[in-house]
């Protein structure tokens, strides 16, 4: 754990960082069941939730819809495009916040820090998630890949957020759960990056994360320990 200077700004990833990805997918399983249940053989929500979590791979499985269809017993199987479209549209309404999110944001705001979100994904869905988390008013910058035309780990998406915040990279922290998209991308831009444990494991072949968090409440302790 390194000794750090207090930042002027903090940026966050959204999915898996501000949200509890596993809990969100389990919540979405209820919506999935309501929509597709009549086409399934069985369809107990608990088992359905387990399958959806397995197929999600932390949100980084490009074949997620195909895997969902293959893993479930269907009476009338849908096309992969139908499953993918439903997941994209409806899962944003089932999102679940990480423990301590509201308290953490309130604490950072009281310290006078400027705050932002940098997220890959479609504009409508990501903004719906922020609204459902009741955090839409907390941010001084919201940068979404679909809106700016490039996605993490492209340095331009981090640079866009820094311009909106009016803060230099050297005085900005970034919190994210993906080792490459979030941590490597942020560090390449000169931000101090914190890896927060979520569904995506840290690669065994890479050196350990320099700064890591077990959960969002730990960020306040790291700020209190700053020089």
Image (cartoon, rainbow, N blue to C red):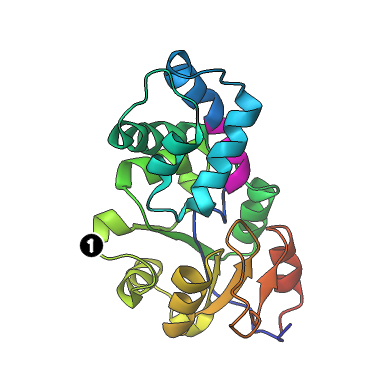
How packed is label 1: few (under 14 Cα within 10 Å), some, or many (20 or more)?
A: few
Determine whether 74 is above or below 117 in the image: above
Q: Is residue 124 above or below residue 162?
A: above
Q: Could you tell me what secondary structure mostly forms the magenta stretch? A: helix
Q: Quadrant of the N terminus?
A: bottom right
Quarter of the rendering containing residue 65: top left
The residue that disc 1 covers is 149
Question: For the image shown, how many numbered marks are present on the structure?
Answer: 1
Q: Position of residue 13 (x, y in %)?
A: 49, 60
Residue 55 sits inside the magenta stretch:
no
Tell me the element at label 1: loop
Is the residue 19 above or below the residue 9 in the image?
Answer: above
Residue 96 seen in the current view: no
Horizontally, residue 58 falls left or right of residue 227, namely left
Asked whether residue 121 appears in the rendered view, the answer is: yes
In the image, 179 versus 196, the foreground residue is 179
Q: Residue furthest top?
A: 38
Quarter of the image holding residue 162?
bottom left
* Image side of residue 156 versus residue 35, left or right: left
Residue 122: percent from left, percent from top: 31, 48
Q: Name the image quarter holding the C terminus.
A: bottom right
Residue 130 percent coordinates (x, y): 46, 43
Q: Nearer the viewer, residue 226 or 188?
A: 188
Which residue sits at x=38%, y=42%?
66
Residue 159, position in %: x, y? 34, 75
Compare residues 226 and 148 and report the one nearer the observer.
148
Point 36% across, 33% down: residue = 83
Is residue 24 inside the magenta stretch? yes
Residue at 25% over, 61% down? 148
Which range of residues does the magenta coloring cover? 21-28
- Residue sitting farthest toward the left: 149
């Amino acid at each position: 754990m390194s000794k750090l200077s207090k930042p002027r700004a903090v940026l966050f990833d959204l999915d898996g960082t501000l949200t509890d990805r596993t809990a969100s997918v389990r919540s979405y399983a209820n919506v999935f069941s309501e929509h597709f249940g009549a086409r399934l053989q069985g369809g107990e929500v608990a088992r359905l939730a387990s399958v959806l979590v397995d197929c999600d791979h932390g949100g980084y499985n490009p074949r997620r819809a195909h895997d969902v269809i293959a893993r479930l017993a269907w009476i009338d199987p849908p096309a992969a495009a139908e499953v993918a479209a439903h997941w994209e549209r409806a899962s944003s309404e089932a999102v679940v916040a990480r423990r301590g999110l509201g308290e953490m944001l309130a604490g950072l705001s009281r310290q006078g820090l400027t705050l932002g979100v940098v997220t890959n994904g479609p504009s409508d869905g990501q903004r719906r998630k922020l609204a459902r988390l009741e955090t839409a008013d907390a941010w001084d910058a919201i940068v979404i890949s679909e809106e700016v035309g490039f996605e993490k780990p492209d340095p331009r998406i981090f640079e866009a957020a820094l311009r909106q915040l009016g803060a230099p990279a050297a005085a900005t922290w970034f919190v994210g759960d993906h080792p490459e998209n979030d941590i490597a991308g942020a560090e390449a831009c000169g931000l101090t990056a914190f890896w927060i444990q979520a569904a995506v494991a840290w690669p065994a072949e890479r050196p350990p994360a320099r700064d890591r968090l077990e959960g969002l409440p730990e960020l306040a302790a790291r700020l209190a320990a700053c020089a």
